[in-house]
Every structure is written in structure tokens, then in C-alpha cells.
Image (spheres, rainbow, N blue to C red):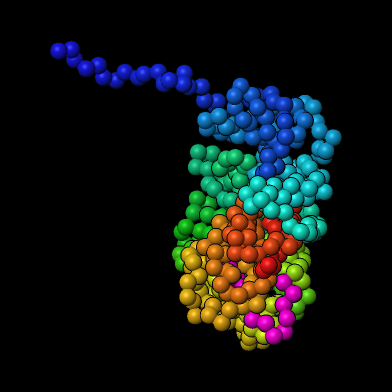
């Protein structure tokens, strides 16, 4: 009997597998159109290329960031033939920093791109178009970001501390001395931060830094080992110079060095002050956030005798302004610490008609006691995963009006399918330009029961 031959590899029926394209390879491409995330799309030798920083109709040289199957991800290195739409990148770090992927597009074109992304998702996934398109809700295209996370990493081989933002398509850190999208109070802190951190005695123990600007300015340092007295003195002097609070995040939760200090932000049109702590979710764009809350209230049209439900309520960003206009607000959030913080915010603003509850909103609503009386209107502001399980039961609550604030058009469109099945009509929709210079799309939609 012949011995079996082991270790042979047989040719697959589809022919030989194409060689993988190595990271770093440069390729000349002609860009056919833009993808929904703002990247240019090119086709070459059976592969689809997604190119950061490229526009439709351009001829570019692209550097490969990664490849899998017939999809190649790349970034623009050179532009041989530029689109008429292209503008000089306002930021000196464009093309290296991964933060602002569409800054080469004029702002009005960025808004048009985001509008197309929302319309395409609603049409393709849900098969609907709103009865009315709202004008884009936007603010200044620069100097808007009141919160930023700064990457910090000790390079043991080079014996140097890297401080900045993550590079496009990699874990590399791009040194940043100025960031045009940061609010002005954070600019001098950002520019002086690297030099200060390099003076600390254990740079290898540093994690990251977060910057905040609200009712106070704050600097939070994540550290993996105790700080020496000398290091703490350097940090405190730095923050004192910039009139900023110092927060430290070692073991446990972040804590202010001065326990009497607190962070917060104002919703000026409603004379509200909301407290928060590092790690809590807050919208990074203060101006668009206020405009968003105002638009949500206008669309929802709450009446003085109504009971309104606010799902994914966070710190009370919508619930507290709503409470000033209705008989009662029931606000629900999945994170227990946020529920407690929101309740404290309501009490500190002398609002006593708002009730806060913790519930897992990734699951069906079920027979929660707070839902049994029903609601005239519902507002929901879910994370990127959307609110599929929640919206499946919304009609049973009796709500005639529903405002859905979305940070992901794909899940908004998916959830719209469910709402239409329940008899809701998509009355109005529009984009919220919360993150200018990026392709990130936030949106608001108004549904009304038929």
C-alpha cells in the first residue's frame, strides 16, 4: 500500500491567490468617487482602494496603510491632479494626524457630504425620505472642541517621550504643537504640555492626558505608578500657570487634586449648570450642543401638561431643559453612575419634576414600572449601536411624537425601519455638524404617529 503523502497544498479552484499588497507601498491612482466616510475610492487590478485625503476626479499617489482581501486602505501622499474643490489643509499636521480626515474640503462641501451620507442611508436601508429636510445645524468650523485626549507613550529604544495625537491608520503618535479645532483656552496648554511631561521623573509610567474646557479648565493625567512629590509639584505649577484644575487617574476613579474643585458646563439658554467628571460623556462641541437641544425641544414641541420620556439621558443634557417645559420627565440611562450624576444635576438646578432610572437599554423595555403610565412624547439619544430593542416597543408607550438624535446614520436608518412598521412617519430630518473637519455624521429625526 502506498504511503499517504502529507503536507501537499492543492491549488484552489478559483486560481492562484493574489499577492498581498505590503504596508507602505506607494501607488498612483485615479479617484472615481467619494465613499460615505469621505475617503476617495479608486479601482485597480481587481482591488478597491479607500484613500484618506483624496477627492473625486483626482490623480494621487497613495501609501498603503493596510490590505485585506481585495480591499486596500491608504492615505494620500501626493496630489498630481487636484479637484477644483480641494483647498489647502488648514492644519500643519494634515495627512499625518488621524483626527481631521476631510479638512481638505471646504466646510460647505463637508456639510453636503454629510447630508448625502444621511439621505443615502435612509433611502437604501429604510426606503424612506423625510417629508421635510432641515437645514444643517452647524457652528464655527474651527476652535470648537472643548475636550481632547492626548496620547502619551515612552519610546524605550529612543529614550524619549512621545506626546500628541494618533496618526492616521496606525498607532504612531504625531507630535502636535497646535490643533486648530481645539477651543482657544486649551491651545496654550496643548502647546506647552509635551515639554512639561518630559520633565517628569518616570515618563514610562504615564498613560494619557485629557484636556477639558467648560465652566472650568482641567488637565487629567493617567498614570500607572505613584507620582513623586517633585512630579506632583511640576504638574501643579503647570496647572496653576494655566489656571486649570489638576485631576489624577491612578487606581480607581479620576480624582481632583483639590477635592473642592468640580467640573461642569452651562446650557446658557436655559440657565442650567451641569456637573460632570472625567470619563462622563459630554458633547465636545458646546455651541452645536446648545443648538441641538434647542432644535430637539422645538421639534418635540413639549406641552406643559405632558409626561415625556428621555432615553439614554446621560447627565441630563436634554432632560433638564425638557423639565422646564413639561409636567414630568422620566429619564433613563444604562450607566448607574451617570444616573446618579443626572439626578444630582436636576436637584442642583432646582428641578423636582424629573425622575431618573437605570436600565439596560440594549434590551427590550419590558414592563418597567416607570413606563406603565405611558408618555406623550419620547426623546432618545443612543450611542453608535443605536436603539433597536428600545424602538421595537415605543408605540406601546403611546407616544405620538418622537425625536431621535443619532451619531450613526446606519443605525438610525435601521431603527427607522422598525418605527415605520409601528406606524410612525418620518416628518423631518437633518444633520448636526458636531465634528467639523471630520466625516463623522450626527443627525436628528422627528417621527410622528400616523
Which residue lies at the image location 77% right of the left edge and 30% below the top edge? 57
Determine whether, in the image, residue 278 is placed left or right of residue 142: left
Q: Nearer the viewer, residue 155 or 380?
A: 380
- Quadrant of the image containing the C terminus: bottom right
Q: Main secondary structure of the magenta part?
A: loop
The tally of labels here is 0
Q: Pinpoint residue 147: horizontal percent, then vertical percent.
A: 66, 60
Q: Nearer the viewer, residue 272 or 186?
A: 272
153 relative to 174 in the view: left or right: left
Which residue: 47% across, 57% down? 224
Magenta-tinted stretch: 300-315
Q: Is residue 10 located in the magenta-colored stretch of the structure?
A: no
Q: Is residue 413 above or below residue 104?
A: below
Residue extending farthest right: 84
Q: Residue 220 in the image: x percent, y percent? A: 59, 63
Q: Percent position (x, y) of residue 304?
A: 72, 84
Residue 339 seen in this snapshot = yes
Amino acid at each position: 500500500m502506498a504511503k499517504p503523502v502529507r503536507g501537499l497544498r492543492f491549488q484552489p479552484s478559483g486560481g492562484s491567490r493574489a499577492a498581498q499588497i505590503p504596508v507602505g507601498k506607494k501607488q498612483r491612482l485615479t479617484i472615481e468617487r467619494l465613499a460615505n466616510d469621505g475617503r476617495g475610492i479608486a479601482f485597480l487590478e481587481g482591488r478597491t482602494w479607500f484613500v484618506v485625503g483624496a477627492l473625486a476626479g483626482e490623480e494621487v499617489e497613495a501609501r498603503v496603510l493596510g490590505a485585506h482581501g481585495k480591499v486596500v486602505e491608504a492615505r494620500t501622499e501626493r496630489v498630481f491632479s487636484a479637484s477644483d474643490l480641494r483647498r489647502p489643509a488648514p492644519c500643519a499636521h494634515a495627512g499625518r494626524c488621524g483626527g481631521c480626515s476631510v479638512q481638505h474640503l471646504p466646510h460647505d462641501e463637508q456639510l453636503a457630504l454629510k447630508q448625502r451620507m444621511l439621505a443615502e442611508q435612509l433611502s437604501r436601508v429604510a426606503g424612506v425620505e423625510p417629508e421635510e429636510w432641515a437645514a444643517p445645524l452647524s457652528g464655527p468650523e474651527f476652535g470648537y472642541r472643548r475636550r481632547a485626549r492626548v496620547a502619551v507613550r515612552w519610546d524605550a529604544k529612543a529614550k524619549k517621550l512621545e506626546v500628541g495625537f494618533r496618526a492616521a491608520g496606525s498607532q504612531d503618535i504625531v507630535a502636535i504643537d497646535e490643533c486648530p479645532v481645539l477651543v482657544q483656552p486649551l491651545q496654550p496648554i496643548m502647546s506647552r504640555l509635551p515639554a512639561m511631561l518630559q520633565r517628569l521623573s518616570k515618563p514610562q509610567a504615564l498613560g494619557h492626558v485629557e484636556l477639558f474646557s467648560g465652566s472650568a479648565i482641567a488637565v487629567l493625567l493617567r498614570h500607572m505608578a505613584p507620582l513623586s512629590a517633585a512630579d506632583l509639584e511640576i504638574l501643579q505649577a503647570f496647572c496653576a500657570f494655566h489656571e486649570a484644575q489638576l485631576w489624577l487617574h491612578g487606581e480607581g476613579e479620576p480624582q481632583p487634586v483639590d477635592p473642592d474643585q468640580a467640573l461642569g458646563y452651562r446650557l446658557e439658554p436655559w440657565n442650567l449648570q451641569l456637573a460632570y467628571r472625567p470619563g462622563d460623556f459630554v458633547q465636545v462641541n458646546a455651541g452645536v450642543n446648545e443648538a441641538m437641544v434647542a432644535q430637539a425641544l422645538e421639534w418635540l414641541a413639549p406641552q406643559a401638561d405632558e409626561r415625556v420620556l428621555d432615553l439614554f439621558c446621560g447627565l441630563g443634557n436634554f432632560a433638564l431643559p425638557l423639565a422646564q417645559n413639561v409636567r414630568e420627565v422620566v429619564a433613563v440611562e444604562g450607566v448607574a453612575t451617570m444616573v446618579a450624576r443626572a439626578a444630582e444635576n436636576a436637584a442642583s438646578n432646582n428641578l423636582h419634576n424629573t425622575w431618573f432610572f437605570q436600565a439596560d437599554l440594549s434590551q427590550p423595555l419590558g414592563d418597567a414600572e416607570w413606563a406603565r403610565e405611558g408618555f406623550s412624547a419620547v426623546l432618545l439619544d443612543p450611542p453608535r449601536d443605536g436603539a433597536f430593542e428600545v424602538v421595537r416597543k415605543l408605540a406601546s408607550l403611546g407616544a405620538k411624537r418622537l425625536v431621535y438624535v443619532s451619531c450613526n446614520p446606519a443605525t438610525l436608518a435601521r431603527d427607522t425601519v422598525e418605527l415605520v412598521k409601528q406606524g410612525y412617519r418620518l416628518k423631518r430630518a437633518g444633520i448636526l455638524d458636531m465634528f467639523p473637519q471630520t466625516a463623522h455624521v450626527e443627525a436628528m429625526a422627528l417621527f410622528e404617529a400616523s
